Image (tube, rainbow, N blue to C red):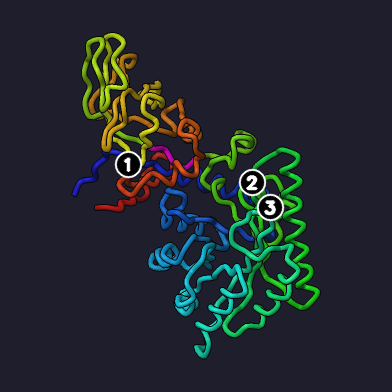
Amino acid sequence: MKLLKRTWADISMDNLSHNYHLLRGAIPSDCRFLGVVKADAYGHGAVPVSRQLVDLGADYLAVSNMEEAVQLRRSYIRLPILILGYTPAFYAEDMVDMGIRQEVHSLEYACQLSEALAGSGKRLKIHIKLDTGMSRLGFFADDPNTVEQIKRISAMEGLVPEGIFTHFSVADSLAPEDQAFTAKQFAEFTAVVDALAAQGVQFKLRHCCNSAATLLHPEYALDMVRPGIATYGISPSEELAGRFDLRPLMSLRTTVSQIRPFRPDVGVSYGRVYTTPGERTLAVLSIGYADGLPRSLSNRASFLLHEKRVPVVGRICMDMCMVDVTDVPEAAVGDVVTVFGTDGEASIPVDDLARLTGTIPYETLCSINKRTPRFYLDGEQRMEVLQYIV
């Protein structure tokens, strides 16, 4: 079957390499790099991105769940993998067999894992999760029982405490009170680690730095960092935008299906929420909300065609949307339109679309769904195509 270029995402592996080396350069030379590839590598394609991270020299990978870990193993990716979310204990032996590490967030959960491995002779490497203020998974760092509970876990059959970690909640903010809170989180984390060390419980890997902390607080790097969104070239927050030379990997593109002239006062798309204010030329694009383009961008967003902005008019449909190309007389059927990313010298950051929909770039990237193939580029050369459907 011939490759259909209807709507697709271009993924720059050059930019992935650039971002990796930028992040590596921010931390001590002996600090390990964990590549966060959960949620299909933030929508970029977990397997191709993981392979590139392996080639670049990453030490670990992290996913959200067992299914994501299995996907990488079936693709012959052999780096140690840490599951950051909960996995039912009956998968404990499978995790050992696949060389997967599991986060452990409670004494009860550790007991379940140990019981699942009892008598098997198998040992599961685990990373203890401390909650220092994120209020998600984890042992409360300020709970006086936490140190004793973790000490008990370290002696349990079948469990090998390889790492201990926490997650910063406001490291991407420069506000003094937020920076102080991040420092407080780090202090609580290290206090627990030191208390455990005093009782003979030590960990090979201590890690707490997400993207923002990796860039802003390399002094918190310890043994390993876990940059996520920055690896994909996106600033961790609007406040940090432009502060670091991060280069986005993804450009989302589509094609022109039809171009027609319209008289004044003609309704466009469902609900007739837009009517032509005068004689206009409109183009139909081959992208809609079934591809992950939010319907809330109707009559709000602009895309790039021949390096010029063309506004979306009318409601975005399931498989199509319309843009006004009156000011682009050279527009033709089959032309490439950039929804976000670069088009020659022009660009539309994914942050712009996220802002219009009241969300963050993380969600926008993860929403580009499996109907959209990913093209992996080395410069202008296509290296690989990831098609989820065909």
Circle 1 packing at 10 Å, graded few (<14), some (14-19), many (20+), is: some
C-alpha gap between disc 1 and disc 3: 38 Å
C-alpha gap between disc 2 and disc 3: 12 Å
Residue nearer the viewer, 111 or 227:
111
Q: Is residue 380 visible?
A: yes
**Of the residues shown, which amino acid type is indicated by label 2?**
Ala
Residue 362 location (% of width, % of height): 50, 44
Q: Which residue is mark 2?
A: 212
Magenta-colored segment: predominant secondary structure = strand
Task: Determine if the magenta segment contains residue 98.
Answer: no
Judged from the image, the secondary structure of the residue bearing numbered disc 3 is loop
Q: Is residue 283 visible?
A: no
Circle 3 packing at 10 Å, graded few (<14), some (14-19), many (20+), is: many
Residue nearer the viewer, 286 or 268:
268
Identify the residue shown where x is 54% and y is 47%.
Answer: 229
Front: mark 2 or 3: 2
**Of the residues shown, which amino acid type is indicated by label 3?**
Ile
Circle 2 packing at 10 Å, graded few (<14), some (14-19), many (20+), is: many
Residue 43 to residue 147: above or below: above
Residue 196 location (% of width, % of height): 75, 72
Magenta residues span: 248-252
Residue 232 location (% of width, % of height): 51, 46
Q: Which mark is residue 291?
A: 1
Front: mark 1 or 3: 1
Most extreme residue toward the right, as rendered?
198
Judged from the image, the secondary structure of the residue bearing numbered disc 2 is helix
* Tag 2 near tag 1, CB within 8 Å: no
Q: Earlier in the sequence, mark 2 or mark 1?
A: 2
Q: Which residue is mark 3?
A: 27
Judged from the image, the secondary structure of the residue bearing numbered disc 1 is helix
Residue 6 to residue 84: above or below: above
C-alpha gap between disc 2 and disc 1: 30 Å
